[in-house]
Image: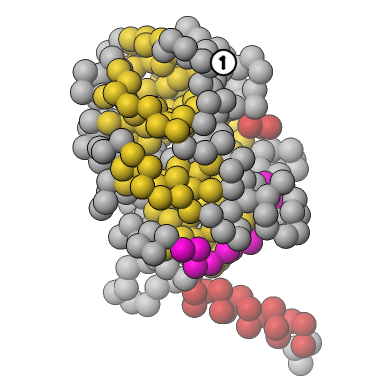
Amino acid sequence: MLSMRRLLSLLLMCAGLVLWHPAAGQAPSPRLYVCNQGEATVSVIDMDAQAVTETVDLTERGFSENAKPHHVVAEPDGSHWYVTLIGANTILKFNQENEIVDRLDGFEVPGLLSLDPAKDVLYAGRSMSAVNPPKSLGMIDRSSMEVTTRVNTFFPRPHPLAVTPNGKHAFIASLATNQFMGVDTETQDTELTRLEGAAQTPVQFAMTPDGSRMIVGGQKTGQLLIFDTSQAPSLSVVDTLQVGQQPWHPVISRQSGLAYVPNKMSNSISVVDVRGASVVATIRGNGLAQPHGAALSPDGRHLFVSNNNREGTYAPSGEKGTVTVIDTQTREIVKVIEVGAYPSGIGTWGGQQPLAM
């Protein structure tokens, strides 16, 4: 006879399979991948059920507890997803069943990722935590997971990264200087833009659905910069807004055009009308505890925000990170999902994220 513990284990496994696998003819639920940088795991969340369905433990796949998964992007068809490991100098490629199918080793301190919507290219910048990373942007063949081109950025600590919706241009910026670079993705020709004034320390980009505007938060100033990208690879700032302390990874809704900007040290989300260049609302509440990454459900109804929770408002602080689910119509927090330690970058298949079309 089965022991009670074994029986419970089987029942939980079956419940998980029912939750995860769709019925015949039913489209699978969109997924959210959450990098738990403090414990070398990735939480997989069913965005419809708003629940963790699997925790991918990298230590069970041969990596150390210091692997530091940092950022994720997923293929538009959900067939594969990619994650950077700062501590292992590696970029992993997973299939839909969350199995490692390929990897790129020796890519020093990989940070943010972006998919080219027109070509089989994965772009990789460098980690924010790295002091002296290579001054280059990596262009990686997604099929072979080999670096095909390294574009010299000429500036230190290249971190924020985005690709235009048509795939013709990529943008990257320096954490250390007010320098931004536009790249022609066909010719690899580049153009530098330098901003005058106070050091911004830009963290991450997000683009409007038509690719005509791009935003980035300045960690040191608490400002949100709005760029005109119509003359890409050249960039020009058209508006500057004050948001919260340390704006991190924004996302822009395909439906409303509104941007959602996590303010890490204000424990808040600024809702921004990009076209009107104005802050229309500020969201606060339980679970917003050092908000970091942001993604939207396919219909734009729910915003998912990862929270470091090292010094935040969610108890117990430091032990568990969270993903806060926010209703974008009422701007109320509807659920707080506990994940692993220090969740950072997030990516989605089926939903909306800043870096993958």
For the rendered model, the colour scheme is: secondary structure
Q: On the image, which quarter does residue 313 sit in?
A: bottom right
* Residue highlighted by disc 1: 176
Q: Is residue 340 magenta?
A: yes
Q: Residue at x 33, y 57 (%)?
A: 300
Does residue 22 lie above or below 332 as drawn? Answer: below
Asked if the stretch drawn in magenta spans residue 94, the answer is no
Residue 97 higher or lower than 130, as above or below: below
In terms of depth relative to the viewer, which is nearer, 342 or 239? 239
Q: Is residue 147 visible?
A: no
Q: Is residue 43 left or right of residue 72?
A: right
Tell me residue 324's x, y (percent).
54, 58
Q: Quadrant of the C terminus?
A: top left
Seen at 48% across and 53% down, the residue is 283
Quarter occupied by the N terminus = bottom right
Residue 316 vertical position relative to residue 308 in the rendered view, above or below? below
Front one among 316 and 329 = 329
Query: Which secondary structure type mostly characterizes the magenta part of the structure?
Result: strand
Label 1: few (<14), some or many (≥20) within 10 Å? Answer: some
Please give left or right for residue 151 compared with residue 170 in the image.
Answer: right
Q: Which region shows up in magenta?
A: 332-343
Residue ID at (69%, 38%): 67
**Kind of element beneath mark 1:** loop
**Residue at figure coordinates x 47%, y 12% from the top left:** 197
* Residue at the far bottom in the pictured view: 1
Would you identify the image quadrant in which residue 301 lies? Answer: bottom left
Q: Amino acid at mark 1?
A: Ala
